[in-house]
Image (tube, rainbow, N blue to C red):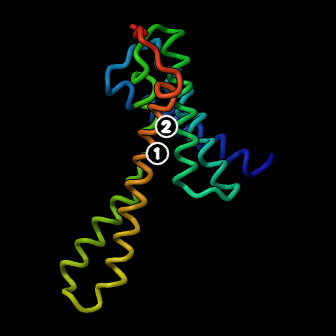
């Protein structure tokens, strides 16, 4: 079997597990859990795949979050539930915790270094902060994309 396919299936499985765990934590109804898991699995696997093809993490995250947004809109109509029930737990596995953590470590290191020699650390911390912000903006933009493209006056619920 293709190693990339094995990696994508593993990525999809573990992101579905994480999203289901967060959905349970947020008291999502049982009937909506498979939708949360499916959206997370498809979105995260898509992000991993397009990153393997050479796309940077920020646009890959936007593409994946938009996919999750459309899947959430579909499940929302099908199960007559709010879209956020499906989209929020599904994007949580894509929250950029590593980049945010590296930003904070860089800031703490700068405070201990003083003025001299801190320029490379400051640049790295700044780049990590920008990357964190762009990924979070991509997640938010992707989730809201179906609503922006297909505005409806009447709410689902």
Which secondary structure, mark 1? helix
Find the distance from the CA under tag 1 to the CA under tag 2: 6 Å
Q: In this view, does 73 lie above or below 12?
A: above
Q: In this view, does 23 lie to the left or right of 78?
A: left
Circle 2 residue: 142
- Residues under numbered marks 1 and 2 in contact, where contact means CB atoms less than 8 Å apart: yes
- Kindly identify the residue that appears in the image at 37 percent across and 24 percent down: 24
Q: Is residue 101 above or below residue 150?
A: below
Q: In this view, does 18 lie above or below 120?
A: above
- The percent coordinates of residue 33 (x first, y second) are 47, 20
Q: Is residue 82 above or below residue 142?
A: above
Q: In which quarter of the image is the C terminus?
A: top left
Q: Is residue 11 left or right of residue 126?
A: right
- The percent coordinates of residue 1 (x first, y second) are 81, 46
Q: Is residue 66 left or right of residue 114?
A: right
Of the pair 87 and 25, the residue shown nearer to us: 87
Where residue 138 is drawn, which disc sits there? 1
């Amino acid at each position: 079997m293709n190693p990339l396919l094995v990696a994508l299936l593993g990525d999809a499985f573990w992101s579905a597990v994480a999203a289901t765990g967060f959905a349970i934590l947020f008291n999502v109804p049982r009937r909506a859990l498979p939708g949360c898991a499916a959206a997370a699995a498809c979105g995260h696997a898509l992000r991993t795949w397009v990153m393997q093809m050479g796309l940077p993490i920020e646009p890959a995250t936007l593409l994946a979050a938009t996919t999750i947004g459309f899947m959430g809109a579909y499940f929302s109509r099908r199960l007559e539930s709010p879209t956020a029930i499906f989209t929020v737990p599904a994007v949580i596995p894509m929250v950029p915790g590593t980049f945010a953590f590296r930003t904070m470590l860089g800031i703490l290191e700068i405070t201990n270094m003083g003025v001299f020699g801190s320029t490379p650390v400051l640049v790295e911390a700044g780049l990590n902060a920008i990357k964190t912000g762009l990924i979070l903006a991509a997640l938010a933009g992707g989730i809201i994309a179906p609503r922006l493209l297909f505005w409806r006056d009447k709410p689902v619920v």
